[in-house]
Image (tube, rainbow, N blue to C red):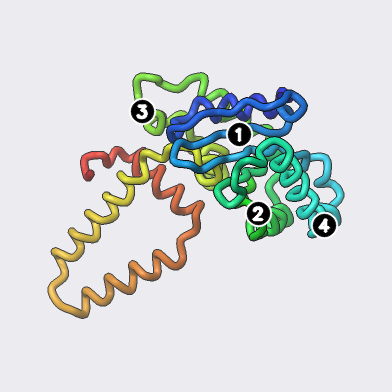
């Protein structure tokens, strides 16, 4: 396994994971792929592909042929090493280091994730600074606390949606998001409290319209922000 990819996998293994097992495979693929089999039957292939050196050539990044090439290479690896598994039950997480997050890269991510053929697809891109911050944070975390209670894992100076840990939590279906129930129960309690204070049907309609608007407009990144903010605020007593 390459040094860069090894760092990523080592970090992922330090996260709270859904019950499962890492599978072994020939060394000629270990620089590119890691495979995790969840005990509920789902499988996750983490595929490390080279994108950083492609970025200066914007035409290549914006070209749909390049995203198809990345997907095709992942399919070949899957067919070669994991052909006994059903592709429709498999997630492939495409991961790569980049120089900076740009709008062009967002288009590239959409091209891959919205490709409906073969397996389910996610793309997780990261910068060297993001990786370094998370590595140092993991070294200094308090192991007497629950993983998600370690405030030092998050950089308070920038948005959560621009940090590697929340991005991995969203993109990697093997990570145990044990704070999700806390967040949603907290939201439910808030709604119930609001209902208790409503005095007529007009106010109830206002509440429903506001809730519908929130559900329709919020992005996955904002959901991650809300979840992390909930647990960081110590609202466990609302469960």
> Which residue sits at x=46%, y=61%?
218
Residue topped by disc 4: 65
Label 4 SS: helix
Whole-number angstrom distance, CA of label 3 to CA of label 4? 44 Å
Whole-number angstrom distance, CA of label 3 to CA of label 2? 36 Å
- Residue 35 is labelled as 1
* Residue 236 placement, left or right of 163: left
Label 1 SS: strand
Please say whether residue 97 is visible from this viewpoint: no
- Residue 146 is labelled as 3
> Which of 51/102 is in front?
51
Categorize mark 4 by other alpha carbons within 10 Å: few (<14), some (14-19), many (20+).
Answer: few
- Residue 118 is labelled as 2
> Which residue sits at x=58%, y=24%?
10
The image position of residue 67, as x and y in percent, is 76, 53
Q: Name which of mark 3 and mark 2 comes first in the sequence.
A: 2
Q: Name which of mark 2 and mark 1 comes first in the sequence.
A: 1
């Amino acid at each position: 396994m390459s040094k860069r990819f090894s760092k990523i996998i080592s970090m992922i293994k330090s996260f709270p994971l859904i019950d499962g097992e890492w599978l072994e495979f020939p060394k000629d693929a270990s620089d590119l792929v890691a495979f995790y089999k969840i005990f509920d039957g789902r499988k996750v292939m983490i595929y490390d592909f080279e994108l950083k050196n492609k970025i200066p050539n914007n035409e290549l990044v914006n070209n749909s042929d390049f995203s198809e090439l990345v997907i095709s290479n992942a399919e070949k690896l899957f067919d070669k090493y994991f052909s006994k598994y059903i592709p429709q039950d498999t997630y492939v997480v495409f991961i790569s280091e980049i120089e900076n997050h740009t709008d062009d890269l967002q288009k590239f991510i959409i091209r891959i994730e919205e490709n409906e053929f073969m397996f389910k697809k996610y793309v997780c891109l990261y910068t060297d600074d993001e990786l370094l911050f998370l590595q140092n944070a993991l070294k200094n975390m308090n192991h007497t606390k629950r993983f998600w209670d370690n405030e030092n894992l998050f950089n308070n100076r920038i948005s959560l949606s621009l940090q590697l840990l929340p991005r991995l939590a969203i993109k990697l279906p093997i990570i145990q998001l044990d704070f999700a129930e806390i967040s949603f129960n907290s939201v439910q309690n808030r709604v119930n409290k609001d209902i208790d204070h409503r005095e007529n049907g007009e106010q109830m309609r206002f509440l429903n319209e506001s809730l519908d608007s929130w559900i329709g407009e919020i992005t996955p990144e904002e959901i991650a922000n809300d979840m992390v903010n909930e647990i960081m605020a110590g609202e466990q007593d609302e469960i």
